[in-house]
Amino acid sequence: MKNKHNYLRILLLCGLTFYLCLCLSMRITLRDTALTEGDCQLYYIVNADGMKGLGHSILMLVDADGAGTVFSFNGMQYSLGESLLGKAGVGKMSTGTMDAEEVSRFLQTGNLELDEDQLTDNYDWALYRNITESDMECILESTKPYIQAEQDFAALYLLWAQTTDKAEREKLDEELEAMSRDASLPLYRIYTNNCDHAARLLAASADRDMQTYSMHTWHMTPNGNLKAFSRRAPKWGAMELGENSVFENLLAFLMIF
């Protein structure tokens, strides 16, 4: 029995050592990339301790004048518990804007203070690169199906909430449920089309490296994807936003899946 316990301890130690080596190999390496004055910029940003420690991803576009637009995709139709059970539903593409001074302050501190879901929080790490104005327009165009689906759902839900007729309410209830099964919509699915998937899909519409990564690589968490993509996209800069806590740094180090 003693030999068996020793064997299990050795296996556990070997497994832990292997995991820590993987964490070291995937750690974020800070690096600068030249930002050309007059160009637009694309930022892929992660809050390491968002979503109960799994992380939360957002995308930020900065125009030639330094003003920023932030996008954050969240579940809207169903609760977190229902989403965890695999229910797909219409999501909310939260959008917020900042002037150049606010963008600069956000990149220095990591504190985002916009009045939308997941847009008032402290963010920790960002990958960034120059893009053209045409690239920026392409990404903005890619957000339209998300925003349209959200608006259609909100309008239908308002009708449902205001209707007192039982038969009409049941009909609207069926229509709301039908939206959650509509494959033509960019539905929120917590395991296959969450905040990080949406951020990368939007970025991929203007970046070939992100397109290739998203087609052939998959990690479960925003932290894992940001680090894995950083290793495969040396043209992107990597920066720390503000001064991260010990817990945030530990999560960023340990989350590799």
Image (spheres, rainbow, N blue to C red):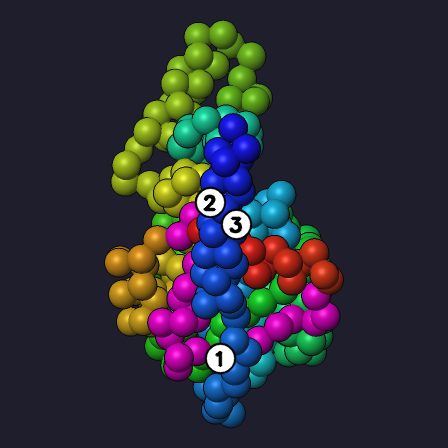
Q: Is residue 35 magenta?
A: no
Q: Which residues are magenta?
A: 219-244
Residue 11 is labelled as 2
Residue 185 x %, y %:
33, 41
* Badge 2 density bin: few <14, some 14–19, many ≥20, Cα 10 Å: few
- Mark 1 or 3, nearer chain start: 3
**CB under 8 Å between discs 2 and 3:** yes
* Badge 1 density bin: few <14, some 14–19, many ≥20, Cα 10 Å: many
The answer to which quarter of the image holds residue 186 is top left
| Dot 1: element | strand
Residue highlighted by disc 3: 13
Q: How far apart in space, not on screen, are marks 1 and 3 (Cα)?
A: 35 Å
Residue 232 x %, y %:
36, 72
Residue 84 x %, y %:
49, 31
Residue 90 is labelled as none
Q: Left or right of 224: which side holds 69?
A: right
**Closest to the observer, 158 or 58:** 58
The answer to which quarter of the image holds residue 18 is bottom left
**Closest to the observer, 5 or 187:** 5
The amino acid on which the numbered mark 3 sits, given as a three-letter code, is Leu
The amino acid on which the numbered mark 1 sits, given as a three-letter code, is Gly
**Closest to the observer, 192 or 159:** 192
- Residue at the image position 57 percent from the left and 21 percent from the top: 162
| Dot 3: element | helix
